[in-house]
Image (spheres, rainbow, N blue to C red):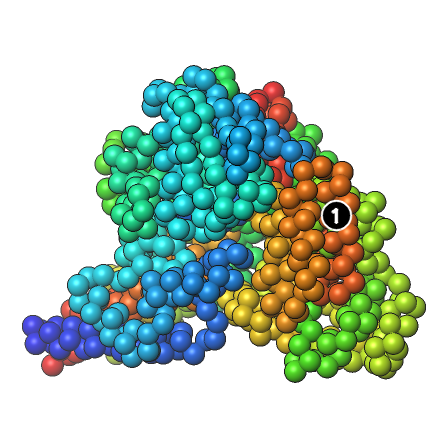
Amino acid sequence: MAHYLVSRLAMAAIMALLSTLVIFLLANTVPGDPVLSQLGDLAASNKEFVAEWRAKWGLDLPLWQRYLIFLERLAHGDLGISIASQRPVLRDIADFAPATIELASIAFLLSIAIGVPLGVLAAVRRDSWIDHVARLISLLGVSAPTFWLAFIVLALFYGGLQIAPGTGRIDTIALPPPSTTGLYLIDSALAGDWQLFRDALAHLILPSTVLAAATLGLITRTTRASMLDSLQQDFVRVARAKGLKERRIVVGHVLPNALIPVVTLGGLAYANLLTGAVMTETIFSWPGLGRYTFRSAVALDFPAIMGITLVVAVTYLFINLLVDISYALLDPRVVR
Amino acid sequence: MTSQWSRCLSRRQLLQLLGCGGAMAGLGLPEQVFAQARKTTLVLGIDISDTITLDPARLAQYTSPMTVSAAYDSLVTMKPGAYIDVAPSLATKWTRTPDGKGWRFSLRDGVKFSTGNVMTVEDVKWSFDRVINLGDQPSQYIAHVDRVEIVDKSTIDIILKQPAEPLLSIIAAPEFVVLERKVAEAQGASAAKDAKTADKAAAWINGNSCGTGAYRIVAWERNQQIQLVRNEHYWGGKPPFERIVIRHISDGAAQTLAVRRGDIDAAFNLIPEQIASLKSEPNVRLAPLTSLDFVYMALTQEPEFNKALAVKEARQAIGYAIDYDGIKNAMLGGAALRPAHYLPIGVNGSTETIARQIGFRQDLDKAKELLAKAGFANGFEFEIIYGAAAVQGVTYQDLALKIQSDLGRIGIKANLRPLDQVNLRTEYTTGKAKGGVLTFWNPPAVENQLWASAVVNRVAKRVHWTPPEDVVKLVSQAATEPDQTKQAELWVEWQKHVIDVAHHFVLFQPVYQIAVRNTIKDFPLTAAGWMLDLHGVNPA
């Protein structure tokens, strides 16, 4: 197991570095000068000013040298200064990541908590009404465009029925909790401010539901298919022949076997939720990484783009690693 | 099997399973918990994603001046709607210095910073020195300032390198405000010659303030909100709100819902459809903000790029083919103005009457005539580039399509090429745009010279035009003319010249519609550069 872990970790580090190189080269094929788009009209026409700003971000250096500087900084735990926000990229990421982590985690929990039981039920009661409902939910979840769904739930539950709060992480006049983790649920709980905790939780419902929709559909379908597959296996027949209760068979024997593909999918889905919430974050004015990523890409903000790439790569690799480890735990044959 | 399963899991259990999402909603909302605070807090819903600094000496964005102008004051200011003369603020009087080389300001007595300390003439000098020595973007607008000199404890001189160049209207902008030196220095600020490297106050100034303004900045959570609290020592009387929250809401539809529900008191980024939907709302009114911004098309005259566009008459034909009224009425619901050229309506020498008299208007016969005169009776092709953005809810894409169809009527074929903002800006500012460019401009201060010199200097280069000496001279002549009537005439004269060469067609000057709840009485919107005089907002 230890050997397995070490080799996986080493591989992950190499992959993360390679991904930054690929993104660095890709981003630099885009023509256009990020400095010009950041400067006001007068400054953008002042050659000395532009040259000074370009030098500030090393944009006047050859490509290979810039990448080496990036690596050197990285070795010191520094991701450089963002061109668009003019702050350390690491600081930006640290500021914006908690909002995304909180949103994505709730969305992920929602999609697992609903998707897995729904998939199990749909498989066990195949072709019953519950199966049809599950199919409809997954179809809607997967096919409804996020921006559309976001507008609809906002207009309906916030604007129309007025039972949900609006955009943002907390009420427009609430003050954020003292920052410990940056996760408002945890920070408000730590501060003992339960009113704020409820407010933050209420603000999470709509965006996390919207964000969870597509994942929920995928998880439901995968669980159902995998359950159906496992239910056909010989060991189920043996278990039934031994007179085990159906509930015990489903929960104790079929489900663990059926969960392996769901774990893979779930891991990737979580990574995807963490890194791909641009639309939801935009419409819900959620101050997270998705929005930051989008703005950095649009502004051709090289240091931020590189920093985010690294974060995304590490997130995926880390979650994949967790998935692999859980494989090993779920199915001992993997390590062998 | 199915029946066995259904026995082990009742319908109720099933609903419980599915209901875990709903259970969260069951927690309930802290509905009226904030009701009390809402009465003493002003909440503005606005897209503030462009805010990258709240440091006056580093300002260069569109929305941040509103916050800065609430927390700090400048020596002189501009009242909403009156953009030709400046009004007193921290200075009560100003005259030319005896030698005529600068301006002398008498400071208001008894002005206190938010700390309660009295503002001194040293604070004023230090603040100007910091802008100059930091050398960031705002310093370029006062590049003609030679030095700032203290005369006595309530008088200060700003001495100019070119004494006739305009100053007052420029220093009314929130870039040129007064900071409390002691506090700022304690946080690492520097106004010394090496301020560029020595100043370490940016991080602190981004989340705090040390000014004389009606409110004090206490927090800026990026892409989330800016929080201000009342300055108890404000020289202009007790500000009415305990707190101001400038809440980032990027989406217009979400702003519409929020202003309707009363979660925000005003919504700033609405598109025509959303504005129309609010017209029947009893608790919300629409307040017009006649801006000094404009959207225009620039045309190159570089023959290597386009032979036809190198001919003045061909460019003029384009100017006479565009349906400006259609853009204003059909696309913007009439909520716009159109100046003759680069001087927006509202500044000296630019009114709607003048614009009608000297500006382009749609006249297809004249356009065809000009085309024939240019030697392109059968039309020609050129390219229009534009970014993926929108002004007042109208996308550049829609504007480009409209222009394309207008020009098609006189046989000119416009090829549209959408670009990302970075490339658009790079192509345009480096003079590589090969045809037309659709873009937007607003200067940091209300000073005719800033608009006019932009045309004859940098924008001229971008369209490969070398302006004749007399046109360049006219700019400084108008800018330095002390008599306002004569000055207006000179500006009209100048506009006629630049209209004739047909490099820029101003398409519209937006009149933004801000939705304001009726719980707010006074809401003094301004086009002077900071959108709203926050100190003048009062509850009903």
Is residue A318 something one can see in this rendering?
yes
In the picture, which quadrant includes the N terminus of chain A? bottom left
Residue B298 image point, x, y percent = 67, 65
Question: Which amino acid is tagged 1?
Answer: Leu
Which residue is depicted at the point 76% across and 38% down? B485
Considering depth in this image, is B488 or A207 the residue closer to the camera?
Answer: B488
Please report the residue visible at 36 percent of the width from the left and 48 percent of the height from the top. B134
Q: Is residue A330 above or below residue B137?
A: below
Q: Please name the residue shown 23% across and 61% down the image.
A: A78
- Residue B461 shown left or right of residue A141 in the figure: right
Chain under disc 1: B
Residue A12 screen position, x and y as percent: 21, 74
> Element under label 1?
helix
**Residue reaching furthest to the left:** A2
Q: Is residue B519 above or below residue B103?
A: above
Q: Which residue is mark 1?
A: B490
Residue B156 picture quarter: top left
Quadrant in which the C terminus of chain A is drawn: bottom left
Q: Is residue B273 visible?
A: no
Which residue occupies the foreground of this view, A191 or A87? A87
- Callout 1: 10 Å neighbours few (<14), some, many (20+)? many
Tally of marks: 1
Q: Seen in the image, is B328 located left or right of residue B215?
A: right
Left or right placement of residue B36 versus residue A271 in this view: right
Q: Residue at x 39, y 27 (%)?
A: B121
Residue B194 left/right relative to B476: left
Q: Quadrant of residue A147?
A: bottom right
Q: Furthest residue to the front?
A: B99
Residue nearest the observer in this picture, A141 or B393: B393
Residue B439 percent location from the top left of the image: 63, 61
